[in-house]
Image (tube, rainbow, N blue to C red):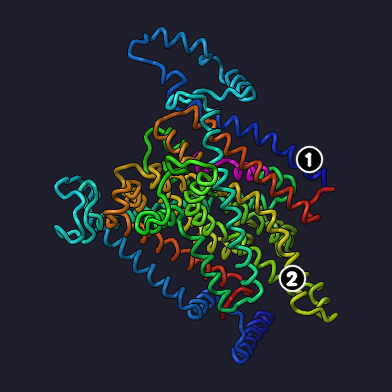
Amino acid sequence: MGKKKQEKAYSGQEAVANMQAKNEAPSGLRVLAREFAMDKGALGALIILVVLILGIFIGSLFLNTDKVMTVDIFKQYNRPGVDGMWLGADEGGRDVFQMLILGARNSLIIGISVTILMEVLGIVFGLVAGYYGGRVDNVMMRFLDFMLVIPTLMIIIVLVTVIPHYNMWTFILIMAAFYWVGTARLIRSKALSEAKKDYISASKTSGTSDFMIMVRELLPNLSSIIIVDATLSLASNIGIEVSLTFLGFGLPNDVPSLGTLVGYANDPSVLTEKPWVWLPAALLILVICVGISYVGNVLRRAADARQRLG
Amino acid sequence: MWKTILRRVLIMIPEIIILSILIFIMAKLMPGDPFTGSITPQTSASQIHQLKVEAGLYDPWPEQYVRWVKNIFHGDLGISYQYKTSVAGLIASRAANTLWLSLITVVLSYVIAIPLGIIAGRFENSRADRGIQLYNYISYAIPPFVFYLLGVWLFGYTLGWVPTSGSVSVGVSGTGAFILSRIHHMILPAVLMALLSTTSTVQYLRSEIIDSKTQDYVKTARAKGVPEKTVFNRHILRNSLLPIAAFAGYSITGLLGGSVFVETVFSYPGMGQLFINSITNRDYSVITVLVLLFGLLNLIGTLLSDIILSIVDPRVRIE
C-alpha cells in the first residue's frame, strides 16, 4: 500500500517536473497531433482524404449499382454537363461521376479488406517466427524466401482467369494470399529483436504461456509498427487492385472500380478524345494513394522518435 | 565467400523444383490442352481421345510432370496455338525488347537516384532534402500504370514527342536509323519507369549517409583534420554506395514484374505484353513458360543481389 502511494507521489512529481521542463514523453495521440501540426502538407492531405472518403461512402449510399451500371447507348460518350451528367458518360452511356463514386467505394473496400487480411496473416506468421526464433524461424523464413521469388503478379492474373465462380471476395482472398509476405518479414524482424528483451525473458521465467506472451506483451509493443505498415500497405493494395482491374484481371465486369474507368483509356480514341471518361478516375487514384501514403509516413515518423519533426 | 555463394545456389535448387511443380499444377488447372488449336469441327471425339492418349494426357500427374521437365531441358517448350509457332522462338523474339527496356531503366534509375540520395543524405533536413523526400513518397505511392498513362497521353498523344506504340518504326533502313528509332520508342517508358523505381535506392543511400556521419571512423577523420569534402567523398560516400550495388539484382526482379504494365500501356512488344495477350487468348502453353521464366529470372536476380552483397559486405558471409 505504502509502495503504491510512493509510486503515485513519484509519478505526480515527475509529471510536474516534466511540465516544467516541457520534455515529457508524450502520449501517442499528442505526438501525432504535433507531427501533423508541424507538417502542414500532411495536415492538408489528411483533411482531403477524410473529406474524400466520407464523400465517397456517403455518396454511394444514394446510388444503386444496378441502376448506375445500366447501359443506355443513346447517352454514349455524352460530354460533361450533358443530360445532367457532371463528368459525362462512358461507352455504355453510364454516368461517369456515379461510376466514379461507386468505383472508388469498391476500391476502398477491397483495399481495406485485403489490408486487414494480409496484416492478420503477416502478424501471426511474423510473431511465431520471431518469437520462437532458431529452427522454427529458419524453416518459416525459407518459406517466405520462396514466396518472394514467385512472380506474384502473373500468378494472380492466371488464378483470376482460372478460378470458377469468381467474385469480389475471391479476388480479395487471392490478393491477400500473395501480399502478406512483406508484412510477415517486417513483423518477424521486429519480433525477433523484441523477443530478446528482458521483459519477455521475465515473463517466460514466471511461467506465462507462449501464446499469452505473444498476444499480451509482444503484440502491443509492435502495435505502432503494425499501424504504420497497415497504412502504407493500404495505399499500395488500392494501387494493386486498381492496376489489376485496369489490365482486366481484377474485379468482375459488373462491379465498377476506379481501374475499370481508367481501363477505358486502353482504347487510344478514348485516351485522346474522351479524357472525361478516364482522367477523373486516374486523378482520384493519384490523390487517394499519395494521400494515404503521405499520412502513413507521418505515422511512421511519429512511431520512431528519432525521425519526429516536433 | 565461395561457401556463401555455393550455399546460396544450393538453396535455389529446391526453390526451382517447388516453383516448377506449382506452375505445372497451375497449367493442369487451366482449361484446354495442346490440341485446342488444331481441333476442327471435323475432328471426331475418338480422334481427340486418341491424340490425348498418345500425348500422355491421361497418365498420372507425376509422370506427366517428369515428362514436362524433360521436354523443357530438351528445349521443347510446346507450341503456341495462337501464333502456331514454337513457344521458345516466340518468347526469344520478345525477350530482347523487354531486356533492353529493363537495362536502360536500371541505368536511368541509378543516374537519377544516386545524386538525389547523396544530396538528401548530405544536406539532411534542408529544403532540398524535404523536396526529395516528397518526391520519394509520391513516386512510391503512385500506381505505376496511372503514371504511364498520363505520360503517354501528355508526351505521346498531346505533344507528339514520342511514338505511342511498338518498338521500332515501320520502314526504317540502316543500322543507325534503326537504333535511333528503337531508342526513340524506348525513351519515354524507360524514363517513366526509372522515375518510379528510384525510391528504395534514394531512401537507402540517404539513411546510410546519415548513419555514417556519426560513425567513429568519420569522427576520427574529422579529428585528424581531413577536409570536409574528402571526409564526405572518401569516407562516407564510399561506404554508403557499396550496399546500393546489391540492389541491382532486386531491381531487375521489380522491373520484370512492372513490364506487364508498361508494355500494355505503350503497346511495346515485349514479354509482359505477350503474357497479357496470351492470357486474353487463353494461350496456355505460352503462359506456363512465361511464368516459369519470370520465376527463374526472379531467382537469378535475388541470387545476384545476395552474391554482390556478400562481396561488398563481409558480415553476411558464412564461414
- Is residue B129 or residue A115 the one in the foreground? B129
The residue that label 2 is drawn on is B233
Query: Residue B60 vs residue B208: left or right?
Result: left
Mark linked to residue B283: none
For mark 2, name the chain. B
Above or below for B200 versus B174:
below
Q: Amino acid at mark 2?
A: Asn
Q: Earlier in the sequence, mark 1 or mark 2?
A: 1
The residue that label 1 is drawn on is B6
* Quadrant that contains the N terminus of chain A: bottom right
Q: Residue A149 magenta-drawn?
A: yes
Q: Residue at x 77, y 51 (%)?
A: B310
For mark 1, name the chain. B
Query: Residue A195 vs residue B221: left or right?
Result: left
Above or below for A186 versus B117:
above
Above or below for A279 versus B49:
below
Which circle, 1 or 2, is nearer the viewer? 2
The answer to whether residue B146 is visible is no
Secondary structure of residue under mark 2: helix
Q: Position of residue A46 (x, y in %)?
A: 42, 71
Q: Amino acid at mark 1?
A: Leu
Residue furthest front in the image: B174
- Number of residues whose C-alpha sits closer than 10 Å to that of mark 1, classed few (under 14), some (14–19) or many (20 or more): few
- Residue B170 placement: quadrant: top left
* Magenta highlight range: A142-157
Query: Residue A297 vs residue A131: left or right?
Result: left
The answer to whether residue B205 is visible is yes
Above or below for B147 versus A135:
below
Query: Residue A194 vs residue A296: left or right?
Result: right
